[in-house]
Every structure is written in C-alpha cells, then in structure tokens.
Amino acid sequence: LILTAEKQVALMDSIKKDSLVRGDIETTVAYTAEDSIITDVEKREVHLYGKAEVKYGNIQLTANYIRLNWTLNELYAIGTYDSTEKKMVGEPVFQDGGESYNTNEIRYNFKTKKGIIHGVITQQGEGFIHGTKVKRDAEGNAYMMGNMYTTCNLEHPHFYINSRKIKMVNNKQIISGLFNIVVNDVPLPLGLPFGFFPIPKNKESGTSGIIFPQYGEEPNGRGFYLRNGGYYFAISEYVNAVLTGQIYSTGSWGLGIGSTYSSRYRYNGNFAFNYNRNFSGDEIDKLLKRDARNDFSLTWSHTPKARGSSTFSANVNIASNSFNNYNAESTQKYISNVASSSVQYNKSFGQLARAGASFRVNQNFGQLNQQTGRRSGGKTDVSTDFSFGISQFAPLAFNGATGRWYESFRLGLDFSGSYGFTNVLSRIDTSYSTLRFKIANPVDSARSRGDVVLPFNGENLSPILGDAKFTGRYSIPIALPNFKILKFINFTPGIGLQGEVFTKQFSYTYLGENTIRIDTLKQLGTEYSYSFSAGMNTRFYGIFHSRMGRLEALRHTVVPSLSFSYTPDFTSDQFGFYQKVQIDDQGTERTFSRFRGINNTGGNGRASGVVSFSLNNMVEMKLKAKSDTASVQSTKVSLLDNLGVNGSYNLIADSLNLSNISVNANTRLGKNLNFNFNMNFDPYIYIRDPQFPGNTTGIRVNRYAIANGQGLARLQNINMSLSTSFSPGQKKRNTPQNVEKTGLPAEQLEAIDRNPQMYIDFEMPWSINLSYNFGWTKTGLAGSNVVQAVTFNGDLSLTPKWKVSVNSGFDFAALRPSITQLNIHRDLHCWDMSLSWTPFAGSAIRASNYNFTIKARSSILQDLKLTRRRSFYDSGGY
C-alpha cells in the first residue's frame, strides 16, 4: 500500500489511538517524509523515504529511510546509497534533548528507551566521540565499543584517545578503559589504564575535578618539581574556586587559591593569593645556611557595572619584592619593577554632592643585583584617601535663569584627605652647615645622612607607622562672570580659597649658644590661603592663499594668553601659621612653619604676584580634491598641531623671579607618524658651591645668563620622540574584546577570555611598530646625560596558520640591544604550538631563555601538552 502523507492522516490517527490505549508509548509520534510514506497495516509498520523525520517528545530522528514498527514500539533508520556520488547519503541524525548523534545505523525502542547505534559520532561538551557500536540504556547511559575520543571537530580527527570501551554517564562524564593516544594516525606508547573526562553543563563555570600538575626541573634552582596541581571547584555558574600547590626536591613548596565570580548586570571579578616558601638550591647558600625566603602575591580585580548612585571597584596587585624574581612564569612579569593597587568606593547624592574613599598601595621592588639576581631596596607606599565635594552651583541664578551677568557666579566645595605611611624614612637634615644653628632634639643619625629604607615587615612596623602622615586639603572654587574686552579678548577673573588640615604642630624655643629645641604638639590645626587671579586670552589667524598644485591655502592660528595671580603674605603673627625664631646669639631671626617643621617642603607663606604667559601656534593647509567629480572638493590637513612657549614671572619674589621657559611641539606627519618635542631653558646661571665641593650641579644664583654672555638662556633638557606603525591598508587588529565577532568556536572564545595575553590575531597579515626616543639633560654645572634608543615590534603571518613576532630595540647610549624576544606561533587546528626565545635580555641572569609548548586547544585536555623550557628562574638561586 503506497499513500501520500496527506492521505494517511485518518488511518494513522486510529493506529495512534490504539497504541495510546494500550499504554505502549507515552506521547504522540509525529513523522513526515519528503518522498513517500508506505504503510503496512498487517505488520503494523510505516516506511518513510526521502528526508524522513520522526519526533517523539524530546527525541528527533532524521534520515533518508526510517521504519516505524508499532508492534515492537521501535524505529529503525539508515542512509541510502547515492550511485552518482558513490557514497551513503542522508545517514541518521539522532537527537535526545541536548545530545546529538551522527550515525550510520540506529535502532531505538520507544517503550524501553533503549537503542543500538552503529558508526556513531556525538559531541559531548568540547569533546567528540567516534564509536563503531553503541548501546543506550533507559537511564541515558551509553556503552560504546571501538572508540575515539577527541576535541578535534573534523570527520577524520588529527588526534584522538583510542579506547576499546567507553561509558558515557548520563551526559555528566565520560569514563574509558585502557587507552592510548593516536596522533595523525600514528599510535603512541602513551596512555593510562583508565580515563575520566567531565562534560561541563550549560551555563556552568565548569565541572569540579583534579588539576594535574606540571613537572620539570630547575637546573640550578629548586630542583625537580611538581607545579600548579590541585583541584577545581565548580561552585555555581556565578562563582568557582581553584586550589593549587607546588613542591620541589630541595624542600621548597607553595600554595595558591583563586576564584572567578560574576553577577549579571552588577559586577564581575577574580581573586588569587599565592604563598611560596623557597629554600635555595645553590651550594654556596647551603654552606652559608641562608634562611628560606617567604614570597607572596595577592591579586584582586573587581569591575562593577554602571548601576545606581554608588560604585565599588578594586584593582589589587600586591607582592613581596622577590615574588616575581622566583615565581613569575612570563618575561614581562619577571622584569616588572613596580606594582600598583587601589580599592575605591564612590557615591553621589543627587546632582549636587559626592563622596569617595580609596585604599592604595604602590610598590617599587628595588634594584636587581646582577651578581645575585635578587632585588633589594624595595619601597612600599600605603595610603587611604577620602574626599567630599559639592559641585559648583549658581546661588544667584534664581529659578535657573542665566541671562544676567551675576547669575553666572558659581560656588563649590572640595575636601580631600589621606593617611599614609611608607618604609622609606625621609632624611632629616640637621647639619649646622645647612641650618646655621643646632638642634637640641635627638635625631636618628642614620636619617641625618639620608633616606633610610626599612624592609617592609612586622619587625619594622612600629617605626614605619611612627613616621605616618595625615594630610587634609580643602578648597572653595569660585567662578566669576567672564567679560569681553574689545569684542575679541576673553577676560576671566577668579578668586580661590584653599587650605590644609594638620594633626600636629611645632613650637620652637631658642636655648642659647645657637641651639633650638623643637616641641611637637598633638593638636589639630589648619593653614589657609586665598588668592586673586585674572586671565586674558584671544585667538587670531593669518591666511596665505596659494595656486601651487593642489594647495589652496595655509592658515596660521595664534593663541596668546596672559594671566596674573596674587597671594597675600601669610607669615605674619596674626595668622599663626609661622613662628619667627632667633637662631644665634647675634639675634638673627628665621621664620619656620608651625605645621611643616624646619625641613619645609610646602609653601613658604610669603606673598607672590605671578604673571604667567603662553603662546600657542597651529598650522593647517587646505588641499583641493584630486578630481573634479569628488564628493568633497577640499580637505584640511594639520601641519603642526601645536607649537607652544610658556613661562611665568613672580613680581614680588626677592630673587629668581623668572621661571624656566619651556617649548613644546607635537604634530602628525602624514597619516601615521607621530612627533613630540619639548625643551626647557633656564634663564639663570650656576656657580660652584664653596661649602660643598662635591656638589657637581652647583648653586643657581640671581644672575641672568644673557648678562654673563651665556646666551639668552641655558638649555636644560630636550626630549624628542617619533613613533609610527604600518599594516596592510592600516587594517584594524582584532583584540580579545572584539574577537567574538570572528566566528571562533565557543571553547576557543572561553580560552581567550581566560588568557587574553595569549591571543594571536592570525587575520592580521603583518604589522610593524617603530619608535625613536632621544633625551638630553644638563642641570647646572653637572655633566650632560643622554638617553637615545630605538625600539620596534612587529609580526608576520607566513601562512594563515603561521605567525612570527619580534620585539627588540637598540640603546645607543649603552651601545647594546634592549630586551629582545622572538615568538613563533602555529595554529594546528585543534592544537597550538608556540616558541618564545629571549636571545638578549640585558642581563646574564635572564639571557638565552626559551619556552616551547605544543598543547591541545580544548580546556578539557589542557594537560595534554609537551613543554620544554629554560626560564629565568631556572638559573637562579631559588
């Protein structure tokens, strides 16, 4: 009996109703076929031909031929042979919920939910399973014979794990028996008696499991090691945790804990803490019985989403001075000498008020000793800051009006404070040659000779906190109405009120015999000042018209400005900010700050009247279009973005009234050549220091260089930089942030998100970045210092799968190359290969480092890799 699909509706409805009455199947079986449907009523079978499809609940089956047997409650599917293409076509594709099987032949029972599949290919998470025969039970478990497990998505994979038996446990995990690895159809003698491969669930950070450690040896360091092994905790789709450890044959060990978390539309972040106790593997260190070194590292990044009136963010990177030296696994991190951390909270109260608080840690790990390879003299600054402010508002602008001149008067408030300490105790200069008097108070002799750097640890915490400082600053910005003078000159008056808050004060007492006692008073005090200012600026142009070629005109823009600010004298006794003190028996008096002490680094409180001036220039040209039919008939091109001169003159100062004169320029030459230039001129001369012959700089005196026949001014420093970049058609490089647009598989996008620094843009054929920097400095009578270097980095895609990159340069002052790195990357489809070589790093300790890795790209098989390296820490003492 041969019927079309439309003519069988009534007949099959009766069959379905009979089946449902017996309870053999649980829901309606829907089926279609593009060619024909043949029903055998006696055998209760339906034969579907040509792109046939059967749907039963969550189960869907497509094939060129499907047979339904209502007596046995089963279906059978197979493809058909195409004599033209000489291959099987329309082979069965079986889907059960989220699982999909590409098969050669399948038999499935609706009632028992069991099935047998021949020649199956199914994807589970990031992995693919190729099986010759599969039996599926009612619980969803699959038992497979003659299997290949791989993360390569090709029909004939580049590599696979070959196992005779595999069990897939209900879409949760894959368990295999004895297996070995096959690469490019070559069986390798590498394998294990059993294997366990988790299948990550949708919307889950992963599946909890063991992280296999790396193994290797540090030839002259900590010996043989097992490193970065531990356990991964998939707590939820919003947070996970990683616990890792490491152990070395010399006794060194380490622990680490990390976590990544996120909350949709609110925030995301990551946290990591590592602790290492390192014992030296150097024989000399063992003979000298040097103590073990404790190293730690704390990183925390918290990024909020814009939401509400408050924000909390954190970017923490704190480490012991030697952590990067002995534990970093990248050259860039190893040579890093600074680390900065901040935790910030800000809140706004409507549109008028705002407040904020932050905690900051800035570290300088010190200088690297070329003989020992260890850093020393590290500096750490810790501070907590807070601020409160009221945005400027117009108190005289009633009902929001802005038409009258006085309605543009604006008023605001800014207050900020900080409490900080550092392990660098600054120098206290109490020498008689400098002060011209003696100090009766006891002073640390070490600090009298210069700055003292204490190791930042618990033993030195007391002197470090004893030198802590609190600072508070406030200002009331006042914006006065602007005026026009002669229609073209902008006149801007201003008033400023600012001050500082102190938690201690100083009192000075003359004891006779050229000696002063300084008493510290623990009481709150404030020092304020106010100033008046006025500024004028305008803009004028000069245009030169031309008929030469495409050039239509040149325009020269000049922007001159002149300003004046006046600050009264605050050293008088009526303010109480300063104290006049007798310093010798002859009655000589000096003025000292009651808040800043004798080593005053702030303002001196004296009156000042400063005139500031600047002159900026811009040059542009206008070019005709290359053809008369162009949509834009002319274009503007900048020849000189800015050429400026600025300086100031203090009318009230008793000497050295004129400031240094600075000249700066910047422009873009062509489309991609950036030029920056600045110079600094000193108008005064320097003479030898009669009291300190070792002072090579000399003393700056109140005599102009032009009056001594040394020119208009003495060039003090000059800096120049040129930078450019080239790429084919200036193609824009893909970044880890926009790489999702390139159509890469989901597992690769996840790997890029976890390790953005490892992303390689193979779509960029080539690129080159060049920069040249020149600096010359000469202060006073001291000798000049020259810094001159050229640096470059670039990459080249030899083929769509090969990428070579180089980063190097040359220091003309030192006459040697800068740190040089050569990187080679190969995309092996389901594998990655990389080689990083540092032939020159400016130090014998870091020279000739290399790192070769070939690894499976999938995160599930991330431990399936081969690594050979000689790193910077492999040749160190730890």
Image: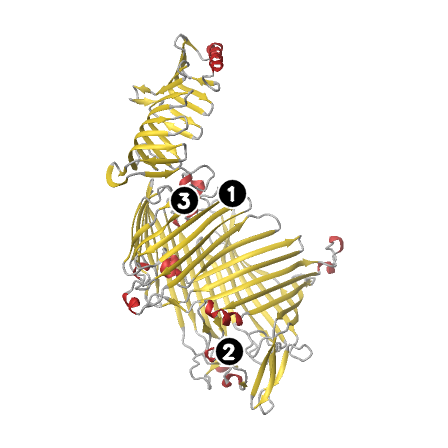
Front residue of 392/360: it is: 360
The answer to whether the residue labelled 2 contacts the one labelled 3, judged by CB atoms less than 8 Å apart, is no
Residue type, numbered disc 2: Ile
The structure residue drawn at horizontal position 36% and vertical position 53%, both measured from the top left corner, is 794
Q: Earlier in the sequence, mark 2 or mark 3?
A: 2
**Marker disc for residue 751:** 3
The answer to whether residue 537 is left or right of residue 433 is: right
Q: Residues within 10 Å of mark 1 (few under 14, many from 20)?
A: few
Give x and y (percent) for residue 343.
Answer: 53, 57
Give x and y (percent) for residue 407.
Answer: 73, 58
Q: Earlier in the sequence, mark 1 or mark 3?
A: 1
**Marker disc for residue 631:** 1
Q: Quadrant of residue 573?
A: bottom right
Q: Nearer the viewer, mark 1 or mark 3?
A: 3
Image quadrant in which the C terminus is located: bottom left
* Alpha carbons under labels 1 and 3: distance apart: 46 Å
Q: Earlier in the sequence, mark 1 or mark 2?
A: 2
Residue type, numbered disc 3: Ala
The answer to whether residue 539 is left or right of residue 398 is: left
**Marker disc for residue 729:** none
